[in-house]
Amino acid sequence: MQGLLDALDGFGGVYLALFLIAVLSGVFPLTNSEAALIAIGVGSSYGWMKLVVLAVIVALGQSLTHAIVFFSARGMAKVGAKKRPWLELRIAKAHELAARWKKSELLLMMLGATVGVPPQVLVAMVAGIIGIRFRTFAVIDICGRIVRFTVIVLVAHFAA
């Protein structure tokens, strides 16, 4: 494993590879950022600082995907609802649900970003549809993802 990482490292490729894995894993669950970070944490001789940098890169990659999902859902809610009555009905139901959870929406975003329950891609979609400010969503998403991935990679590294 370390030989492969050294080869990638020579070109800066380990950073790019993890970033691309993170972007994909934001919407495609079969590419798993957590598994990649655990494998690197356990199988590499990287120091803890480099592992933290890799965790931040993964967090930024997934947050980029979540931002795209957020804005796609927001755009679909605005444009698509006008042309499709069934979609407008679903969006209205999402708004009703959001109104009931109004005091807990920040907690749900934090749980999705750090623990992964509910899935953060779903949180991004709902946040875009119900009109949560992007700045609020992005700060919670990025910070939560950094905490999540840093803990995962460092626990794997020090447990090995």
Image (cartoon, grey):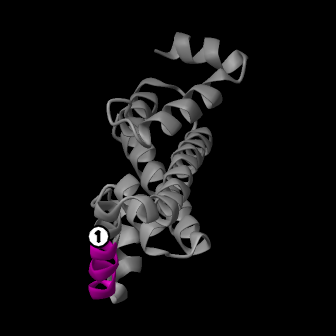
Count of marks, rendered view: 1
Residue type, numbered disc 1: Leu
**In front of the other: 9 or 47:** 9
Q: Residues within 10 Å of mark 1 (few under 14, many from 20)?
A: few
Task: Tell me the residue that label 1 is attached to.
Answer: 89
For residue 139, which quarter of the picture? bottom right
| Residue drawn at (46%, 29%) of the image | 40
Q: Is residue 133 above or below residue 71?
A: below
For residue 159, which quarter of the picture? top left
Q: Provide residue 35's location: percent of width, then percent of height.
A: 36, 33
The magenta segment: 92-101
Q: Provide residue 149's location: percent of width, then percent of height.
A: 45, 49
Q: Is residue 120 above or below residue 82?
A: above
**In front of the other: 10 or 125:** 125
**In front of the other: 17 or 80:** 80
Q: Provide residue 126's location: percent of width, then percent of height.
A: 38, 65
Tell whether position 45 is magenta. no
Please indicate, yes or no, whether residue 63 appears anywhere in the rendered image. yes
**In front of the other: 125 or 40:** 125
Tell whether position 96 is magenta. yes
Q: Provide residue 14's location: percent of width, then percent of height.
A: 61, 25
| Residue drawn at (48%, 57%) of the image | 76
| Residue drawn at (54%, 12%) of the image | 4
For residue 107, which quarter of the picture? bottom left
Q: Main secondary structure of the magenta part?
A: helix
Say whether residue 51 is left or right of residue 98: right
Quarter of the image with the C terminus is top left
Please indicate, yes or no, whether residue 114 appears anywhere in the rendered image. no
SS under mark 1: helix
Say whether residue 20 is left or right of residue 86: right
